[in-house]
């Protein structure tokens, strides 16, 4: 039988790096796709780069994808690669579509041409729900994306479904709600707070400026969520799943937990800055993972408190190691 | 909405002016050259009358002040000259705007040069890092920043300061490092220069932002920057000239080897000068995201013609 082979696009990102580690732990041979870059530093995969093979290809280049898949003949392809920066999708909507939308079609075409038995995972996103049409959101909830990024993800989702139905490909769309980790970018509110708490504890700053403390989100741990991706491709039949905790927590709670972890009172260090207040409409993103729980036997294993605390610990350690 | 752009014939200035016009603003372009169109004004920053006339004519609601003496080496030869243009010229603009007594957003393009040599233990230079310029040029820019912040406190002027790191892409001034390196690669392609190229230290990490990202960042700051604040405009990532050289070589289809010429080594050459980009991202949602490889290709195409 030999080792199973997996190809991960977007392997250098948060999810890609956790997925690579997870699959290596399951004794997969792991390959990752890398765009040409003059920079060779990818901190997220530093721990595993000796155990994975990086292939040069680009989601905008059909032939490069075909060549890589033909050369490796993976058992599973995980398409995590995208222009993941939502604000950038406004200034670069065409490129966003080329990479995030059409990239999926190019991969599906390459799979179909090389070996239609290759299993395919599409990284879909709660951004597709956007202006939510039901609360909580399930696999049946209508999409209403609110950015070029969201639209691109909707396109890729439907391409995945369509190729499954038209060509009988084992193709799954995982609709993941917000998932965080110490590898999350500093612009995301979870890391803004955990990094801020760490910096304040280390005496590097005095306060953080926040917007609406009552804003709520369904936040999970990226490491738990990548396990669901793998489970989808092991099931008897290909299907789509919402991956979420089903709980929401407010930014206020985020601050409470993060600052308590470093022994500080958040109210002493958090300043409301009206510049961060978003427009009035509230998108109540809460995912219902019932289907994943019952069919894949997946559930989130990290509580909100544990997630925020581990992120704070990692940020504190980063500053301590740098001293 | 009247927007006045000084330095409007420069690489950034003319592109910003075009974009704002396309977006529907009434744009006044102030430049050193003879005006050859509507709403163009001739500007000599060290000529008080010229500066006053520019403000009186354009009656701006918003000002993007890009015009400056930008050459570092010559600023050592004529420090009074660089202060005259960069500080006194800016002060004359501020004085004239204050007299109008109406709110005016004032976006000033300063430079990462104001930081000087970063302290050794600093990984990313954030806006709180002490600014210790090491050239008259950089000191004049810092002095201009202070003048602008002063007028923010004593008038209806609403200042926002940008400290721009290195720009890479097309249209760069010929004195810029990227432009010079690209010309050397072209010289190898044309057979005018032979490898190994004699170079200084190419390994230092600097922060290069792609031209299109720089433009987007300036516009985002114009729109959403907080009044009175100073923002780095950078990527938060380090790139070495060596990496840029090798990418230029790849684009040009030649192999380039280099050899260190000790006479080209600088006395002071910090290993890393990289900016922290988080403050601007948090206040404006803007983050530089374009890949540098395309900008390097654009740079080469621009030089090679």
Image (tube, coloured by chain):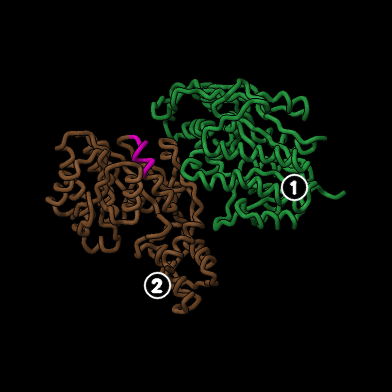
Chain colours: A green, B brown
* Left or right: B225, with B152 as reference point: right
Q: What chain does mark 2 sit on?
A: B
Q: Is residue B99 visible?
A: yes
Distance from the alpha carbon under mark 2 to that under mark 1: 52 Å
- Element type where label 1 sits in the image: strand
Which residue, given by chain and number where applicable, does mark 1 sit on? A6
In the rendered view, would you say B54 is above or below B257? above
Q: Nearer the viewer, residue A247 or B146?
A: A247
**What residue span does the magenta drawing correspond to?**
B219-226
Q: Do the residues marked 2 and 1 share a common chain?
A: no
- Element type where label 2 sits in the image: helix
Q: Nearer the viewer, residue A306 or B217?
A: B217
The residue at the point 62 percent across, 50 percent down is A59
Magenta stretch holds residue B222: yes
* Left or right: A60, with B154 as reference point: right
* Left or right: A84, with A19 as reference point: left
The residue at the point 24 percent across, 47 percent down is B28
Q: What chain does mark 1 sit on?
A: A
Numbered label attached to residue B263: 2
The residue at the point 75 percent across, 56 percent down is A70
Q: Main secondary structure of the magenta part?
A: helix
């Amino acid at each position: 039988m030999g080792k199973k082979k997996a190809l991960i696009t977007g392997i250098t990102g948060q999810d890609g790096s956790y997925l690579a580690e997870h699959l290596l732990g399951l004794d997969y041979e792991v390959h990752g796709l890398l765009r040409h870059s003059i920079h060779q530093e990818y901190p997220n995969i530093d721990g595993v780069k000796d155990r994975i093979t990086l292939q040069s290809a680009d989601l905008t280049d059909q032939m490069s994808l075909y060549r890589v898949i033909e050369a490796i003949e993976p058992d599973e392809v995980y398409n995590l690669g995208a222009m993941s920066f939502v604000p950038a999708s406004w200034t670069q909507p065409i490129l966003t579509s080329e990479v995030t939308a059409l990239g999926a079609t190019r991969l599906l075409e390459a799979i179909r041409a090389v070996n239609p038995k290759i299993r395919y995972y599409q990284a879909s996103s709660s951004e597709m729900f956007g202006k939510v049409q039901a609360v909580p959101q399930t696999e049946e909830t209508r999409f209403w994306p609110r950015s070029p990024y969201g639209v691109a993800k909707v396109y890729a989702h439907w391409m995945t479904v369509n190729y499954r139905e038209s060509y009988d490909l084992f193709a799954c769309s995982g609709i993941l709600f917000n998932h965080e980790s110490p590898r999350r970018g500093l612009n995301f509110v979870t890391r803004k707070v955990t990094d801020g708490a760490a910096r304040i504890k280390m005496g590097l700053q005095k306060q953080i400026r926040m917007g609406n403390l009552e804003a709520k989100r369904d936040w999970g741990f990226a490491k738990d969520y990548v396990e669901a991706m793998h489970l989808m491709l092991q099931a008897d039949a290909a299907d789509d799943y919402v991956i979420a905790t089903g709980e929401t927590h407010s930014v206020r709670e985020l601050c409470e937990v993060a600052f308590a972890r470093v022994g500080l009172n958040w109210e002493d260090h958090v300043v409301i800055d009206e510049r961060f207040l978003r427009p009035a409409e509230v998108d109540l993103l809460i995912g219902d993972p019932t289907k994943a729980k019952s069919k894949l036997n997946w559930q989130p294993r990290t509580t909100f408190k544990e997630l925020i605390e581990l992120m704070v610990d990692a940020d504190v350690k980063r500053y301590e190691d740098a001293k | 909405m009247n927007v006045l752009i000084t330095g409007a014939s420069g690489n950034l200035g003319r592109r910003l002016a075009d974009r704002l016009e396309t977006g529907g603003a009434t744009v006044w372009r102030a430049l050193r050259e003879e005006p050859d169109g509507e709403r163009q004004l001739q500007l000599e920053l060290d000529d008080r009358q010229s500066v006053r006339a520019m403000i009186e004519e354009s009656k701006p609601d918003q000002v993007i002040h890009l015009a400056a003496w930008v050459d570092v080496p010559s600023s050592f030869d004529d420090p009074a000259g660089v202060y005259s243009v960069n500080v006194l010229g800016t002060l004359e603009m501020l004085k004239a705007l204050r007299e109008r007594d109406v709110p005016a957003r004032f976006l000033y393009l300063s430079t990462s040069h104001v930081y000087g040599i970063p302290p050794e233990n600093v990984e990313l230079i954030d806006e709180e890092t002490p600014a210790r310029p090491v050239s008259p040029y950089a000191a004049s820019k810092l002095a201009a920043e202070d003048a602008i912040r002063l007028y923010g406190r004593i008038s209806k002027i609403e200042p926002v300061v940008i400290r721009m790191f290195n720009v890479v892409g097309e249209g760069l001034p010929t004195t810029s490092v990227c432009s010079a390196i690209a010309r050397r690669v072209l010289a190898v392609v044309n057979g005018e220069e032979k490898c190994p190229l004699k170079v200084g230290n190419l390994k230092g990490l600097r922060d290069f932002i792609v031209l299109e990202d720089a433009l987007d960042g300036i516009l985002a700051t114009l729109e959403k920057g907080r009044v009175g604040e100073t923002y780095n405009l950078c990527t938060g990532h380090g790139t070495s000239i060596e990496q840029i050289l090798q990418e230029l070589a790849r684009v040009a289809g030649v192999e380039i080897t280099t050899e260190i010429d000790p006479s080209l080594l600088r006395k002071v050459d910090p290993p890393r000068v990289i900016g922290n980009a988080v403050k601007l991202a948090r206040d404006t949602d803007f983050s530089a995201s374009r890949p540098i490889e395309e900008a390097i290709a654009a740079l080469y195409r621009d030089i090679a013609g």
